[in-house]
Amino acid sequence: MEKTLSIIIPAYNEEKTIEKLLKIVKSVSLGKYIKKEIIVIDDGSKDNTVDVIKKVQRLMKEVKLFEHIKNAGKGFAIRTGIKHATGDIIIIQDADLEYDPYEYPQLIKPILKGETKIVYGSRYLNNSQKTEFKNFMKKHNSGYTLAYLGGRFLTLLTNILYNAKITDEPTCYKVFDAKVLKSINLKCKRFEFCPEVTAKVLKKGYIIKEVPISYKPRTFEEGKKINWKDGVHAIWTLIKYRFYD
């Protein structure tokens, strides 16, 4: 039976990477019976991101573009994408080149095989990726070390609060059976999508299966946007949804 993978791509000021990313996404082979639906949400970009996407659309008919007039945040953009997704499986894809779309097949495989309803791509399940993290942090300032440690803390907090056993809570690569994701009442606006959706699926009793992925972090100069305030908000989100909905 043919299935469709909906790829949700929130984008804000990503004119330098979005065209290359979309071409990579299109080129990924998912097998004979898996189609792709590519949903890009421009979140009020102030650069030429929209123009670049529209240029790509002329060659890639499977790309759907939805525009926010004003910047509303990554979480709100993802919610827009979820609303418009028509596929059987949904994956979240950042608009930069930190994550590799060629890993889609291994990410969707456990759902296709009926092993689980939710898959997270973990950056901490292979030793070579851990080495890359260490080398990156050695080359750059302490802000990246803080971000790394913050991500590890969020994962630990998730496991404690929700009795989970995951290794990478803040990973971008989150894959869902579409019916499951659409059943979650999300309220996120900024980067708290990750802790909110994680908290709510775990409270519903779903098991998150992880598969190893690669990761190439970019610098703040290259466009990385998350900061320590988002980390604090993520901590509060995990605690809040442990006790409230």
Image: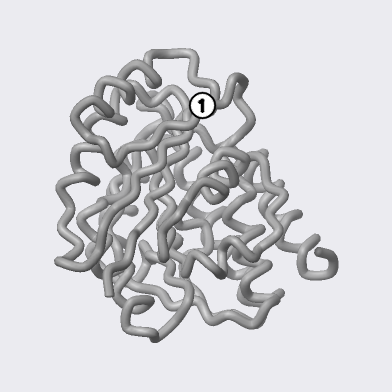
Tell me if residue 50 comes above or below residue 132 in the rendering: above
Give the amino acid at mark 1: Glu
Q: Residue at x 31, y 49 (%)?
A: 99
Q: Nearer the viewer, residue 52 or 243?
A: 52
How far across and down, in percent of the image, does residue 76 sit?
62, 40
Q: Residue furthest right?
A: 244
Tell me if residue 47 comes above or below residue 206 in the rendering: above
Q: Is residue 63 left or right of residue 241?
A: left
- Tell me where residue 194 sits by quadrant: bottom right
Tell me if residue 140 comes above or below residue 106 in the rendering: above
How far across and down, in percent of the image, does residue 94 sit?
40, 43
Q: Nearer the viewer, residue 188 or 146?
A: 188
SS for callout 1: strand
> Circle 1 sits on which residue?
67
How far across and down, in percent of the image, does residue 153 sit?
59, 62
Q: Residue at x 20, y 45 (%)?
A: 26
Which of the image's four quarters has the N terminus? bottom left
Q: Residue at x 49, y 64 (%)?
A: 178
Which of the image's four quarters has the C terminus? bottom right
The residue carrying pointer 1 sits among few (fewer than 14), some (14 to 19) or many (20 or more) residues within 10 Å by Cα, namely some
Q: Residue furthest bottom?
A: 115
